[in-house]
Image (cartoon, grey):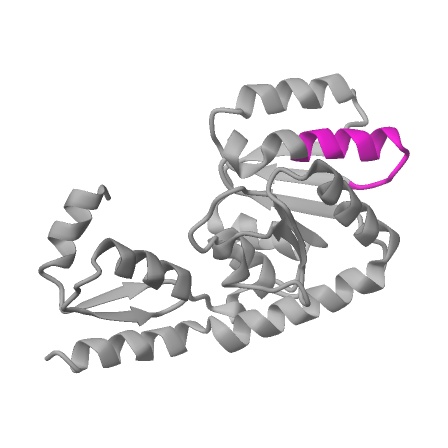
Amino acid sequence: LTSFTAKAALSRASVVVVQSPAAAADVNRLVPHKRFETAVVPNWIDADAFPVTSRTNDVRRFVYLGWLETFKGIPELLDVATELHENGETFELWLCGGGSMRTEVAERIARLGPNSPVKYLGWVPEEEKRRLLAQSDVLVHPSHSEGMPNAVLEGMAAGLAIIACRIPGVEALIGADDALLIGAGDRRGLREAMAALIADPSLAARLGARARARATANHDVERAACQLLALVAGRG
């Protein structure tokens, strides 16, 4: 929404539901003399729908879910995967999604040759996505800008270790104690995070368990439904 259309919509609202305290602050800055209530209801998920598998052995598979765009950190992710591969690390990186970088991704994979660790799977349906998450060890999400990324939440629900950028939308989901967070566009930080989890599978397993616990405790779909129903009932 533009500032004009947002203000017009907000002027008619009695309650505005946002994903995070940071989003609430943005709304309040946009309409400083507001007449509505701002309610924070974080993104929700049915964690039981995501199978969790044992991840105590080698870390071998990273997965990315989302648009293949520059602002999503795809250039640095491809650079880091290439560096790790050339340094002899054994791993796979599955890229799932569409976007303007599809051709470049395909070209980069081709240059890596038949033993490329990077696989492009395109858009995948919901059931296939859950299967891929269950077969992966780490969700890597180097996006520079997000609201509250569902891809990270899905990785958390599936019990994957999370590598993501230290931005408000991600930090509203998971903190540095429970994930490896890096600066936006930080290739070195991304390389070190991926290498650290390849080298220490027990760390990946611990982070995955913590991520799953946060998803179930803070983003349960039934809890969110109760919050939304209470907001509606309070204005019935």
x and y percent of residue 62 in the render?
A: 70, 46
x and y percent of residue 116 in the render?
A: 77, 28
Quadrant, the C terminus? bottom left
x and y percent of residue 205 in the render?
A: 76, 65
Q: Quadrant of residue 3?
A: top left
Dominant SS of magenta comes to helix
Residue at x 17%, y 69% (from the top left corner): 36
**Towards the viewer: 13 or 219:** 13
The residue segment tinted magenta is: 77-91
Does the magenta segment cover residue 83?
A: yes
Compared across the picture, whether 127 is left or right of 181 comes to left
Q: Quadrant of residue 76?
A: top right
Residue at x 73%, y 44% (from the top left corner): 189
Q: In the displayed structure, would residue 211 be above or below residue 138? A: below
Q: Quadrant of residue 82?
A: top right
Of all residues, the one furthest to the right in this rendering is 88
Residue at x 17%, y 82% (from the top left corner): 234
**Towards the viewer: 128 or 194:** 194
Compared across the picture, whether 67 is left or right of 20 comes to right
Does the magenta segment cover residue 49?
A: no
Residue at x 52%, y 63% (from the top left corner): 173
